[in-house]
Image (tube, rainbow, N blue to C red):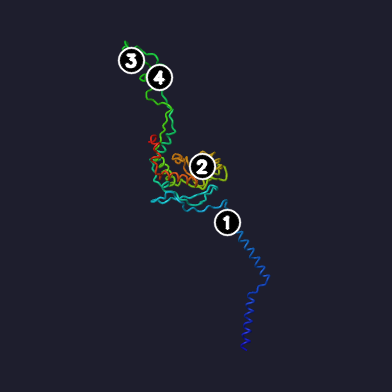
Amino acid sequence: MATKIINKTVAEFSLRITRCFFIPSKTIQTNSAVFQERLETSITNVEEQLPTTIRPPLPIIYSRKLAFPPKFKAPRQVWVSNMDTVEEEKLGLIDLHPEVFAERPRVDIIHENVRWQQLYRHVSYANTKVRYEVRGGGKKPRPQKGSGRSRHGSIRSPIWKGGGIVHGPRSPTPYFYMLGFNTRLNGLRSTLSAKLAQDDLHVVDSLDIPTDDPSYLESLVEERGWGPAVLFVDDNDIMPLNITAASDARGHYNLMPVYGLNVYSMLKHHTLVLTLAALERLEERLLFHLNRNDAASAGQKYRLDSV
């Protein structure tokens, strides 16, 4: 009797398990089609939500190896942005050497550089005539003796009205002089530091823009608040074609190679835009001259022409 009860219980339990796991084939096919439809819908929605990128995003730059690592100053950081879209896209952060971009701005040194740059290309053409250049005066105005008047040999003497001028300006008069090397070097450091402190120094990955239309460059500058006058600096004097054509129609957008960067041009423009390659080259040269051991002997041949 007990055996029959056990067998009946096991059979009923097995039947219940079989009913739980048994699914008709029609139901399986229907659920599979619904699942496939939902999966395709989800994939389509995800693809629509993903942003379309023209170029692959650059990796975020947290730090870079600085030459002559500073001992007592922390590196400064600046955003690296793009130029291929009007809207600014932050591509990463890059470290700047504090001895180049975080110096205390010396206004007196900046003024010396600006004054030097204004004077070394200035030539005065003011001119006066000395006594031998004035017309006339070849005859002695009166006898040497007997008239009771003063003695004169020419009416074009400087003491006569209409005569020659003594110690007057003679043209051309150049005002060129050579400013000291360290003053020029520290002028660049002070100006770069002031630009960075005022948020007027920006770094871009390159100067490539998608079109040569000047309105695109104007929209880009206006969108990013770079001011009416912008100086773009690259490491080479052969600039990309599009930005060369776009800036050529606007006199307040100028291109300059890094070897021509100077204090006067940086102060003349509201915003300074450096490429990554120009930043590397500029920092490399300034740090080399700041830390070279043969600076005195290398500048010896220029000492007579400097002040």
Left or right placement of residue 246 versus residue 112 in this view? right
Q: CA distance from mark 4 to mark 2?
A: 54 Å
Q: Quadrant of the image for the C terminus?
A: top left
Looking at marks 1 and 3 on the same chain, the residue that comes earlier in the sequence is marked by: 1
| Residue at the (62%, 63%) spot, across then down | 39
Front: mark 1 or 3:
3
Please, which residue is most extreme toward the bottom here? 1
Q: Write down the residue under mark 2.
A: 236
Q: Write down the residue under mark 1.
A: 50
* Residue 13 in picture, x, y percent from top left: 62, 80
* Residue 218 in picture, x, y percent from top left: 53, 43
Q: Secondary structure at mark 2?
A: loop
Looking at marks 2 and 1 on the same chain, the residue that comes earlier in the sequence is marked by: 1
Front: mark 4 or 2:
2
Look at label 2 and name its amino acid: Asn
Q: Write down the residue under mark 3.
A: 151
Look at label 1 and name its amino acid: Leu
Front: mark 4 or 1:
4
Looking at marks 4 and 1 on the same chain, the residue that comes earlier in the sequence is marked by: 1
Name above or below for residue 304 compared with residue 58: above
Q: Secondary structure at mark 1?
A: loop
Look at label 4 and name its amino acid: Tyr
Q: Write down the residue under mark 4.
A: 132
